[in-house]
Image (cartoon, grey):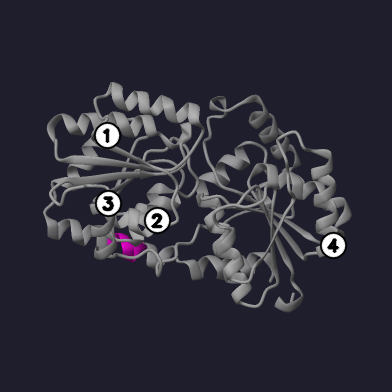
Amino acid sequence: MKAQSARILFLVRSLNFGGTERQLVMLATGLKASGVPVRVVTFYDGGSLRDELAGSGVECRSLMKRSRWDVARFLWRWIRMVLDYRPAVVYSFLGSANLMAIAAKPWLGHTKIVWSVRASSMDLNRYGWLDRLLYRIECRLSRFADLIIANSHAGRDYAIAHGFPSAELIVISNGIDVERFCPDPKVREQLRKRLRVAADESFIGLVGRIDPMKGHDVFLRAAAILRHDRQNVRFLCVGEGPEYYRRRLLALTEELGLSRAVIWEGATGDMEAVYNSLDIATCSSSSEGFPNVIGEAMACGVPCVATNVGDAQRIVGDAGYVVMADDPMALAEAWCRVLDMGAAERARLGGRARARITQHFSRDRLIEVTSRALGL
Protein backbone atom coordinates (compact mmCIF):
# COMPACT_ATOMS: atom_id res chain seq x y z
CA MET A 1 0.00 0.00 0.00
CA LYS A 2 1.61 3.23 -1.14
CA ALA A 3 1.64 6.16 1.31
CA GLN A 4 0.08 8.59 -1.15
CA SER A 5 -3.07 6.44 -1.61
CA ALA A 6 -3.29 5.06 1.95
CA ARG A 7 -5.72 7.47 3.56
CA ILE A 8 -6.12 6.95 7.27
CA LEU A 9 -9.02 8.18 9.38
CA PHE A 10 -8.56 8.41 13.14
CA LEU A 11 -11.73 8.34 15.23
CA VAL A 12 -11.85 9.49 18.85
CA ARG A 13 -14.45 10.87 21.23
CA SER A 14 -12.76 14.25 21.76
CA LEU A 15 -9.47 16.12 21.58
CA ASN A 16 -9.35 17.24 25.18
CA PHE A 17 -6.17 16.79 27.20
CA GLY A 18 -5.55 13.11 27.94
CA GLY A 19 -3.00 10.35 27.43
CA THR A 20 -4.97 8.62 24.68
CA GLU A 21 -5.61 11.88 22.86
CA ARG A 22 -1.94 12.86 23.02
CA GLN A 23 -0.91 9.54 21.51
CA LEU A 24 -3.40 10.03 18.69
CA VAL A 25 -2.06 13.52 18.00
CA MET A 26 1.50 12.19 17.97
CA LEU A 27 0.59 9.43 15.50
CA ALA A 28 -1.51 11.65 13.25
CA THR A 29 1.11 14.39 12.97
CA GLY A 30 3.92 11.86 12.50
CA LEU A 31 2.12 10.01 9.72
CA LYS A 32 1.14 13.28 8.07
CA ALA A 33 4.79 14.37 8.10
CA SER A 34 5.75 11.09 6.39
CA GLY A 35 3.34 11.76 3.53
CA VAL A 36 0.27 9.77 4.60
CA PRO A 37 -3.07 11.59 4.09
CA VAL A 38 -4.68 11.83 7.53
CA ARG A 39 -8.07 12.95 8.83
CA VAL A 40 -9.03 13.05 12.51
CA VAL A 41 -12.74 12.77 13.31
CA THR A 42 -14.14 13.51 16.77
CA PHE A 43 -17.57 12.98 18.30
CA TYR A 44 -17.59 16.45 19.85
CA ASP A 45 -16.38 19.74 18.43
CA GLY A 46 -13.41 21.69 19.80
CA GLY A 47 -10.90 20.30 22.25
CA SER A 48 -7.64 21.62 23.66
CA LEU A 49 -5.48 19.56 21.29
CA ARG A 50 -7.29 20.46 18.07
CA ASP A 51 -5.08 23.48 17.34
CA GLU A 52 -1.95 21.35 17.64
CA LEU A 53 -3.29 19.02 14.95
CA ALA A 54 -4.44 21.83 12.70
CA GLY A 55 -1.07 23.56 13.09
CA SER A 56 0.60 20.43 11.73
CA GLY A 57 -1.65 20.38 8.68
CA VAL A 58 -3.84 17.50 9.86
CA GLU A 59 -7.47 17.78 8.74
CA CYS A 60 -9.91 17.71 11.67
CA ARG A 61 -13.65 17.09 11.39
CA SER A 62 -16.35 16.87 14.05
CA LEU A 63 -19.53 14.80 14.04
CA MET A 64 -21.10 17.52 16.20
CA LYS A 65 -22.58 15.14 18.76
CA ARG A 66 -24.98 17.10 20.94
CA SER A 67 -25.43 14.77 23.90
CA ARG A 68 -25.03 11.18 25.05
CA TRP A 69 -28.47 10.37 23.63
CA ASP A 70 -27.88 11.94 20.20
CA VAL A 71 -27.53 8.56 18.51
CA ALA A 72 -29.43 8.13 15.23
CA ARG A 73 -28.44 11.44 13.58
CA PHE A 74 -24.92 11.10 14.97
CA LEU A 75 -24.55 7.64 13.44
CA TRP A 76 -25.91 8.87 10.08
CA ARG A 77 -23.42 11.78 10.05
CA TRP A 78 -20.61 9.31 10.75
CA ILE A 79 -21.59 6.95 7.92
CA ARG A 80 -21.84 9.84 5.46
CA MET A 81 -18.46 11.25 6.51
CA VAL A 82 -16.57 7.97 6.27
CA LEU A 83 -18.18 7.14 2.89
CA ASP A 84 -17.12 10.56 1.61
CA TYR A 85 -13.50 10.10 2.71
CA ARG A 86 -13.12 6.41 1.77
CA PRO A 87 -10.05 5.73 3.92
CA ALA A 88 -7.82 2.69 3.55
CA VAL A 89 -7.76 2.44 7.35
CA VAL A 90 -10.15 3.54 10.09
CA TYR A 91 -8.20 3.58 13.36
CA SER A 92 -10.49 4.11 16.36
CA PHE A 93 -9.46 4.89 19.93
CA LEU A 94 -11.34 3.49 22.95
CA GLY A 95 -14.68 1.76 23.40
CA SER A 96 -17.35 4.05 21.97
CA ALA A 97 -15.17 4.98 18.97
CA ASN A 98 -14.40 1.29 18.39
CA LEU A 99 -18.12 0.53 18.23
CA MET A 100 -18.67 3.40 15.78
CA ALA A 101 -15.91 2.08 13.54
CA ILE A 102 -17.50 -1.38 13.43
CA ALA A 103 -20.91 0.16 12.73
CA ALA A 104 -19.53 1.59 9.48
CA LYS A 105 -17.89 -1.64 8.32
CA PRO A 106 -20.80 -2.95 6.15
CA TRP A 107 -20.50 0.18 3.96
CA LEU A 108 -16.72 0.30 3.67
CA GLY A 109 -15.75 -2.65 1.51
CA HIS A 110 -12.00 -3.22 1.78
CA THR A 111 -11.33 -0.54 4.41
CA LYS A 112 -9.31 -1.95 7.30
CA ILE A 113 -10.92 -1.45 10.72
CA VAL A 114 -8.32 -1.09 13.48
CA TRP A 115 -9.21 -0.78 17.16
CA SER A 116 -7.12 0.64 19.96
CA VAL A 117 -7.54 -0.76 23.47
CA ARG A 118 -5.72 1.07 26.22
CA ALA A 119 -6.58 -0.22 29.68
CA SER A 120 -6.09 -3.33 31.80
CA SER A 121 -7.73 -4.80 34.91
CA MET A 122 -10.49 -2.21 34.99
CA ASP A 123 -12.92 -2.45 37.89
CA LEU A 124 -16.10 -1.82 35.93
CA ASN A 125 -18.11 -1.74 39.15
CA ARG A 126 -16.70 1.76 39.67
CA TYR A 127 -18.51 2.95 36.55
CA GLY A 128 -22.13 3.36 35.48
CA TRP A 129 -24.41 0.79 33.86
CA LEU A 130 -23.98 2.29 30.39
CA ASP A 131 -20.18 1.98 30.51
CA ARG A 132 -20.49 -1.65 31.61
CA LEU A 133 -22.99 -2.41 28.84
CA LEU A 134 -20.84 -0.77 26.15
CA TYR A 135 -17.80 -2.79 27.23
CA ARG A 136 -19.76 -6.05 26.99
CA ILE A 137 -20.89 -5.06 23.48
CA GLU A 138 -17.31 -4.14 22.55
CA CYS A 139 -16.12 -7.58 23.67
CA ARG A 140 -18.80 -9.27 21.55
CA LEU A 141 -18.04 -7.23 18.42
CA SER A 142 -14.24 -7.35 18.71
CA ARG A 143 -14.09 -10.36 16.36
CA PHE A 144 -15.18 -8.10 13.49
CA ALA A 145 -12.15 -5.80 13.76
CA ASP A 146 -9.36 -6.50 11.28
CA LEU A 147 -6.66 -5.57 13.78
CA ILE A 148 -6.67 -4.63 17.46
CA ILE A 149 -3.72 -2.73 18.93
CA ALA A 150 -3.18 -2.77 22.67
CA ASN A 151 -0.74 -0.24 24.08
CA SER A 152 0.43 -2.67 26.78
CA HIS A 153 1.02 -6.38 27.29
CA ALA A 154 -1.22 -6.25 30.34
CA GLY A 155 -3.97 -4.68 28.24
CA ARG A 156 -3.68 -7.42 25.63
CA ASP A 157 -3.98 -10.15 28.28
CA TYR A 158 -6.98 -8.41 29.84
CA ALA A 159 -8.75 -8.04 26.49
CA ILE A 160 -8.18 -11.68 25.55
CA ALA A 161 -9.50 -12.80 28.95
CA HIS A 162 -12.72 -10.89 28.18
CA GLY A 163 -13.28 -12.44 24.77
CA PHE A 164 -11.18 -10.39 22.34
CA PRO A 165 -9.62 -12.56 19.59
CA SER A 166 -5.94 -13.22 20.32
CA ALA A 167 -5.01 -13.69 16.64
CA GLU A 168 -5.86 -10.09 15.76
CA LEU A 169 -4.46 -8.51 18.94
CA ILE A 170 -0.95 -7.07 18.92
CA VAL A 171 0.97 -4.79 21.29
CA ILE A 172 2.47 -1.46 20.27
CA SER A 173 3.69 0.49 23.28
CA ASN A 174 3.05 4.22 23.50
CA GLY A 175 5.66 6.66 22.30
CA ILE A 176 7.16 9.60 24.17
CA ASP A 177 8.40 12.75 22.46
CA VAL A 178 11.81 12.93 24.10
CA GLU A 179 12.62 16.23 22.39
CA ARG A 180 9.62 17.90 23.97
CA PHE A 181 9.88 16.09 27.30
CA CYS A 182 13.41 16.70 28.49
CA PRO A 183 15.16 18.11 31.58
CA ASP A 184 14.78 21.90 31.81
CA PRO A 185 15.99 23.61 35.03
CA LYS A 186 14.64 26.98 33.87
CA VAL A 187 10.99 25.91 33.57
CA ARG A 188 11.37 23.96 36.82
CA GLU A 189 12.30 27.11 38.67
CA GLN A 190 9.58 29.19 37.00
CA LEU A 191 6.70 26.86 37.84
CA ARG A 192 7.84 26.21 41.39
CA LYS A 193 8.03 29.95 41.88
CA ARG A 194 4.50 30.42 40.53
CA LEU A 195 3.19 27.66 42.79
CA ARG A 196 5.16 29.05 45.75
CA VAL A 197 7.12 25.87 46.35
CA ALA A 198 10.31 26.69 48.22
CA ALA A 199 13.70 25.53 47.01
CA ASP A 200 14.17 23.38 50.12
CA GLU A 201 10.75 21.70 49.79
CA SER A 202 10.38 18.33 48.11
CA PHE A 203 7.61 18.27 45.51
CA ILE A 204 5.71 15.08 44.62
CA GLY A 205 3.13 15.06 41.85
CA LEU A 206 0.28 13.05 40.38
CA VAL A 207 -0.84 13.83 36.83
CA GLY A 208 -4.08 12.35 35.55
CA ARG A 209 -7.77 12.94 35.11
CA ILE A 210 -9.79 12.93 38.32
CA ASP A 211 -11.22 9.44 38.07
CA PRO A 212 -11.53 6.55 40.56
CA MET A 213 -9.05 4.40 38.64
CA LYS A 214 -6.29 7.03 38.99
CA GLY A 215 -6.00 6.45 42.75
CA HIS A 216 -6.07 10.03 44.00
CA ASP A 217 -7.38 8.76 47.35
CA VAL A 218 -4.38 6.44 47.68
CA PHE A 219 -2.05 9.28 46.75
CA LEU A 220 -3.57 11.55 49.41
CA ARG A 221 -3.40 8.90 52.13
CA ALA A 222 0.24 8.23 51.26
CA ALA A 223 0.87 11.99 51.42
CA ALA A 224 -0.60 12.09 54.93
CA ILE A 225 1.71 9.25 56.01
CA LEU A 226 4.77 10.99 54.58
CA ARG A 227 3.85 14.37 56.07
CA HIS A 228 3.66 12.85 59.52
CA ASP A 229 7.47 12.80 59.64
CA ARG A 230 8.42 15.23 56.89
CA GLN A 231 6.86 18.68 56.93
CA ASN A 232 8.96 20.05 54.07
CA VAL A 233 7.09 18.05 51.42
CA ARG A 234 4.41 19.46 49.12
CA PHE A 235 2.14 17.65 46.67
CA LEU A 236 0.68 18.49 43.27
CA CYS A 237 -2.40 17.02 41.54
CA VAL A 238 -2.88 18.01 37.90
CA GLY A 239 -6.01 17.09 35.96
CA GLU A 240 -9.73 17.56 35.60
CA GLY A 241 -12.77 15.41 36.15
CA PRO A 242 -16.38 15.32 37.37
CA GLU A 243 -17.11 18.01 39.93
CA TYR A 244 -18.80 15.60 42.35
CA TYR A 245 -15.69 13.42 42.52
CA ARG A 246 -13.37 16.41 42.78
CA ARG A 247 -15.38 17.66 45.78
CA ARG A 248 -15.04 14.25 47.40
CA LEU A 249 -11.26 14.37 47.02
CA LEU A 250 -11.07 17.92 48.36
CA ALA A 251 -13.04 16.78 51.41
CA LEU A 252 -10.58 13.92 51.91
CA THR A 253 -7.68 16.35 51.60
CA GLU A 254 -9.12 18.44 54.41
CA GLU A 255 -9.94 15.40 56.53
CA LEU A 256 -6.32 14.24 56.28
CA GLY A 257 -5.00 17.67 57.27
CA LEU A 258 -3.40 18.26 53.87
CA SER A 259 -5.19 21.41 52.72
CA ARG A 260 -2.02 23.53 52.84
CA ALA A 261 0.22 20.78 51.51
CA VAL A 262 -1.65 19.81 48.32
CA ILE A 263 -1.92 22.01 45.24
CA TRP A 264 -4.74 21.26 42.79
CA GLU A 265 -4.24 22.37 39.19
CA GLY A 266 -6.51 21.84 36.18
CA ALA A 267 -5.41 20.30 32.89
CA THR A 268 -2.64 22.19 31.15
CA GLY A 269 -0.77 22.06 27.86
CA ASP A 270 2.52 22.90 29.57
CA MET A 271 3.22 19.42 30.90
CA GLU A 272 6.97 19.79 30.38
CA ALA A 273 7.02 22.42 33.12
CA VAL A 274 4.85 20.31 35.42
CA TYR A 275 7.14 17.28 35.24
CA ASN A 276 10.30 19.34 35.57
CA SER A 277 8.97 21.04 38.69
CA LEU A 278 8.71 17.71 40.51
CA ASP A 279 11.20 15.79 42.58
CA ILE A 280 9.14 12.62 42.23
CA ALA A 281 6.38 11.80 39.73
CA THR A 282 3.77 9.28 40.82
CA CYS A 283 1.25 6.98 39.20
CA SER A 284 -1.10 5.64 41.90
CA SER A 285 -3.63 4.06 39.54
CA SER A 286 -5.51 0.84 40.14
CA SER A 287 -5.77 0.24 36.39
CA GLU A 288 -3.65 1.38 33.44
CA GLY A 289 -2.38 0.11 30.13
CA PHE A 290 0.66 2.24 29.39
CA PRO A 291 0.75 5.17 31.84
CA ASN A 292 1.99 8.04 29.65
CA VAL A 293 2.62 10.28 32.63
CA ILE A 294 5.36 7.96 33.88
CA GLY A 295 7.07 7.82 30.50
CA GLU A 296 6.89 11.60 30.05
CA ALA A 297 8.20 12.32 33.54
CA MET A 298 11.05 9.83 33.08
CA ALA A 299 11.95 11.53 29.79
CA CYS A 300 12.29 14.75 31.81
CA GLY A 301 14.77 12.99 34.09
CA VAL A 302 12.35 12.85 37.04
CA PRO A 303 12.47 9.77 39.32
CA CYS A 304 9.16 7.92 39.36
CA VAL A 305 7.19 5.79 41.77
CA ALA A 306 4.36 3.83 40.16
CA THR A 307 1.84 1.23 41.17
CA ASN A 308 2.25 -2.18 39.58
CA VAL A 309 -0.53 -1.88 37.02
CA GLY A 310 -0.49 -2.30 33.27
CA ASP A 311 3.04 -2.19 31.89
CA ALA A 312 4.40 0.09 34.63
CA GLN A 313 7.17 -2.36 35.54
CA ARG A 314 8.26 -2.67 31.91
CA ILE A 315 8.44 1.11 31.61
CA VAL A 316 10.18 1.92 34.90
CA GLY A 317 12.62 -0.99 34.94
CA ASP A 318 15.55 -0.22 37.25
CA ALA A 319 15.07 3.54 36.90
CA GLY A 320 12.49 4.02 39.67
CA TYR A 321 10.22 2.11 42.04
CA VAL A 322 7.09 0.05 41.47
CA VAL A 323 4.79 -0.84 44.37
CA MET A 324 1.51 -2.66 44.89
CA ALA A 325 -1.67 -0.78 43.98
CA ASP A 326 -4.07 0.48 46.65
CA ASP A 327 -1.33 0.51 49.30
CA PRO A 328 -0.66 4.04 50.65
CA MET A 329 2.05 2.82 53.02
CA ALA A 330 4.02 1.16 50.20
CA LEU A 331 3.74 4.35 48.16
CA ALA A 332 4.97 6.53 51.04
CA GLU A 333 7.89 4.17 51.75
CA ALA A 334 9.00 4.29 48.10
CA TRP A 335 8.86 8.09 48.18
CA CYS A 336 11.07 8.00 51.28
CA ARG A 337 13.67 5.88 49.48
CA VAL A 338 13.95 8.46 46.72
CA LEU A 339 13.94 11.47 49.06
CA ASP A 340 16.66 9.88 51.21
CA MET A 341 19.02 9.68 48.26
CA GLY A 342 21.75 12.25 47.94
CA ALA A 343 21.51 14.78 45.12
CA ALA A 344 24.04 12.94 42.95
CA GLU A 345 22.34 9.57 43.38
CA ARG A 346 18.94 11.04 42.57
CA ALA A 347 20.39 12.71 39.45
CA ARG A 348 21.81 9.36 38.31
CA LEU A 349 18.40 7.75 38.81
CA GLY A 350 16.79 10.48 36.70
CA GLY A 351 19.44 10.02 34.02
CA ARG A 352 18.72 6.29 33.83
CA ALA A 353 15.02 7.07 33.56
CA ARG A 354 15.49 9.35 30.55
CA ALA A 355 17.87 6.91 28.85
CA ARG A 356 15.35 4.09 29.24
CA ILE A 357 12.54 6.05 27.58
CA THR A 358 14.79 7.27 24.77
CA GLN A 359 15.95 3.73 24.02
CA HIS A 360 12.68 1.80 24.28
CA PHE A 361 9.69 4.15 23.97
CA SER A 362 10.50 6.95 21.55
CA ARG A 363 8.01 8.76 19.32
CA ASP A 364 9.87 7.66 16.17
CA ARG A 365 9.61 4.02 17.17
CA LEU A 366 5.86 4.35 17.74
CA ILE A 367 5.28 5.84 14.29
CA GLU A 368 7.51 3.33 12.51
CA VAL A 369 5.97 0.25 14.17
CA THR A 370 2.40 1.54 13.73
CA SER A 371 2.99 2.28 10.04
CA ARG A 372 4.09 -1.31 9.46
CA ALA A 373 1.14 -2.71 11.41
CA LEU A 374 -1.36 -0.62 9.41
CA GLY A 375 0.27 -1.58 6.12
CA LEU A 376 1.06 2.01 5.18
Read off the residue under disc 4: 84
Q: Are marks 1 and 2 in contact (CB under 8 Å)?
A: no
Image quadrant assignment for residue 330: top left
Of the residues shown, which amino acid type is indicated by label 2? Met
| Residue mark closest to the camera, 1 vs 4 | 4
Q: What is the C-alpha distance between the residues marked 1 and 4?
A: 54 Å
Of the residues shown, which amino acid type is indicated by label 1? Ala
Of the residues shown, which amino acid type is indicated by label 3? Arg
Read off the residue under disc 1: 330
Q: Are marks 3 and 2 in contact (CB under 8 Å)?
A: no
Magenta part of the chain: 352-356
Please tell me how crowded label 4 is: few (under 14), some (14-19), or many (20+) other residues with Cα within 10 Å. few
Please tell me how crowded label 1 is: few (under 14), some (14-19), or many (20+) other residues with Cα within 10 Å. some
Query: Can you see residue 326?
Result: no
Read off the residue under disc 3: 194
Looking at the image, is mark 1 or mark 2 earlier in the sequence? 2
| Residue mark closest to the camera, 3 vs 2 | 3
Read off the residue under disc 2: 271
| Residue mark closest to the camera, 1 vs 2 | 2
Image quadrant assignment for residue 128: top right
